[in-house]
Image (cartoon, rainbow, N blue to C red):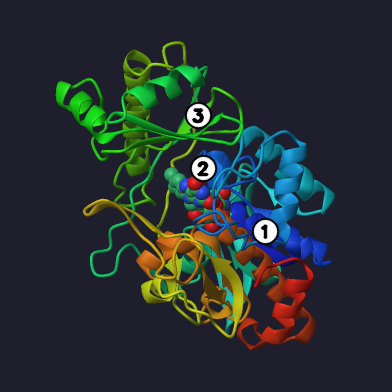
């Protein structure tokens, strides 16, 4: 079978994967990204997760992620894709994000294999040899010295037959999925007037310049619409939207649906169909009923559903819920995260569990939580890091994913140079290198 060889092979071109591949290339390693969609960005660009959380603490006061993330954000600003920080997040627009990431990959000579799915993988002893990818041109073997599973679904770990976790412990169900969509042409000042006059029905927070940051249609308004049959929103009582960095344009994350088997194409089709129905209904509900939306239009919806949680790799350490809420520190820290546990539970409903240290605090991600057990040259990062169900509901945010990517690629560099398996590299050296390249640890 035809093949290619790289120093670092990254499966998945989402925030975690680009953090890894771009860092590897900057360190002089040859790197490839295998991505099933037609652009980089993962949930950012394919699922319209149009806000970068995790760069700051939950309160937005303290910056806790730097390095490769800073470069991406600066490039995005220059390209007009974001107007910068708003509260604790950085809202952005997807086309500019995909463009900027594509340009960076080209400049750094990262080989991107688009429309290509990693469908198999091979391990000899404890060394991953290759991943087999399938695309229009058939199958190809991509060999590497180091492999990084940034698929969000731990696909590589799964294909290699290594251990993984999936869903909530004991019951196995996943967090609910969402199909975000954009509404354009809203009149912000009309909505602000309405929110201020009908306090029980809508709320709004504004940026310093008076533009809308985020808005909520409140529960009484939603409950009434659902009762009257004018709103189809079967799995949620909340409606939240935020501005995408362009006046009058908002993205809505209100659609929700449980997902049983995320690997079953027919089930994904029926979940997507239901989420599109919800998006359509929400749009017509606000257009008909909420001042400011009268002349708005349904701009577009994400091309793929946003999966929050599926499989997680079993690593040398499993990040726990206690680690998160107790703000634990680790000798082998490689990243910080300050996001609350943000749970979209299909049975218990949506809930937040905040860190005990308060909203300006953080916990640390240990290196061992990205080193996959049973393989000497495999990392799992981002959504599929080694973490308990509830811990992942915090650590999954995209700023933290970028930081994990930078750490995995830097560790890959040290592993290749020293000839040592990933779990045995010098962690102090790793931390020094990360700090020198702007990581905040
Ligand atoms: C609805 C929703 C709202 C969210 N809101 C926020 C938010 O506001 N801010 C925030 O920071 N985070 C948010 N998150 C979380 C965040 O989007 C993800 O956790 C983050 O994208 C994780 O990055 P990742 O690279 O690990 O995974 P992903 O973004 O999921 O990227 C994985 C990539 O791997 C590719 N892939 C998967 N399997 C294969 C395969 N076998 N072969 C080839 N390619 C493959 C996928 O196509 C994808 O591009 C939200 C998530 C959802 C679903």
Give the image quarter of residue 19: bottom right
The residue under the point 27% across, 40% down is 236
Q: Nearer the viewer, residue 39 or 36?
A: 39
- Regarding residue 12, the answer to whether it shows in the image is no
Q: Element under label 2?
A: loop
Q: Tell which tag, 3 or 1, sits nearer the viewer.
A: 3
Which residue extends farthest front? 197
In the displayed structure image, the side of residue 101 where residue 90 appears, left or right? left
Mark 2 is surrounded, within 10 Å at the Cα level, by few (under 14), some (14 to 19) or many (20 or more) other residues, namely many
Residue 356 position, x and y percent, is 39, 70
Residue at the disc numbered 1: 19
Q: Nearer the viewer, residue 36 or 77?
A: 77
> Is the residue 343 above or below the residue 438 in the image?
above
Residue at the disc numbered 2: 49
Q: Nearer the viewer, residue 194 or 218?
A: 194
In the displayed structure image, the side of residue 113 where residue 149 appears, left or right? left
Q: Tell which tag, 2 or 3, sits nearer the viewer.
A: 3
Disc 2 residue lies near ligand 1 with CB under 8 A: yes
Residue 107 position, x and y percent, is 84, 49
The residue under the point 25% across, 40% down is 235
Residue at the disc numbered 3: 250
N-terminal-most mark, 1 or 2: 1
Residue 306 position, x and y percent, is 44, 44
């Amino acid at each position: 079978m035809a093949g290619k060889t790289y120093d670092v092979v990254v499966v998945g071109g989402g925030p975690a994967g680009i953090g890894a591949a771009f860092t590897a290339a900057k360190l002089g390693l040859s790197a490839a990204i295998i991505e099933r969609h037609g652009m980089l960005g993962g949930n950012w660009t394919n699922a319209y997760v149009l806000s970068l959380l995790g760069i700051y603490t939950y309160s937005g006061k303290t910056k806790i992620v730097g390095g490769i993330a800073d470069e991406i954000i600066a490039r995005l600003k220059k390209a007009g894709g974001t107007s910068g920080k708003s509260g604790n997040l950085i809202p952005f627009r997807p086309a500019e994000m995909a463009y900027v990431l594509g340009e960076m990959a080209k400049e750094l000579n990262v080989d991107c294999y688009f429309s290509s799915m990693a469908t198999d993988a091979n391990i000899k002893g404890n060394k991953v040899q290759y991943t087999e990818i399938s695309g229009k041109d058939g199958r190809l073997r991509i060999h590497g010295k180091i492999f990084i599973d940034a698929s969000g679904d731990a696909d590589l770990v799964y294909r290699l037959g290594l251990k993984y976790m999936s869903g909530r412990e004991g019951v196995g169900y996943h967090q609910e999925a969402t199909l975000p969509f954009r509404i354009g042409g809203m009149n912000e000042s009309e909505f602000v007037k309405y929110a201020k006059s009908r306090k029980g029905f809508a709320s709004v927070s504004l940026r310093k310049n008076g533009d809308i940051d985020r808005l909520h249609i409140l529960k009484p308004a939603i409950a009434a619409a659902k009762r009257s049959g004018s709103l189809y929103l079967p799995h949620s009582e909340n409606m939240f939207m935020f501005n995408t960095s362009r006046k009058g344009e908002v993205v809505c994350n209100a659609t929700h649906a449980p997902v049983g088997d995320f690997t079953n194409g027919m089930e994904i089709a029926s979940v997507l169909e239901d989420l599109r129905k919800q998006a359509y209904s929400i749009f017509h509900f606000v257009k008909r009923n909420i001042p400011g939306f009268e002349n708005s239009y349904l701009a577009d919806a994400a091309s793929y559903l946003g999966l929050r949680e599926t499989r997680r790799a079993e690593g040398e350490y499993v990040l726990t819920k206690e680690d998160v809420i107790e703000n634990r520190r680790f000798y082998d820290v490689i990243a910080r995260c300050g996001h609350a546990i943000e749970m979209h539970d299909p049975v218990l409903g949506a809930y937040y569990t905040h860190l005990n240290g308060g909203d300006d605090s953080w916990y640390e991600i240990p290196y061992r939580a990205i080193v996959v057990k049973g393989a000497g040259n495999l990392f799992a990062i981002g959504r599929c890091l080694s973490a308990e169900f509830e811990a992942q509901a915090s650590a999954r945010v995209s700023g933290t994913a970028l930081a994990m990517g930078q750490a995995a690629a830097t560790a890959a560099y040290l592993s290749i140079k020293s000839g040592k398996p990933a779990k045995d590299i010098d962690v102090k050296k790793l931390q020094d290198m990360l700090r020198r390249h702007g990581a905040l640890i």
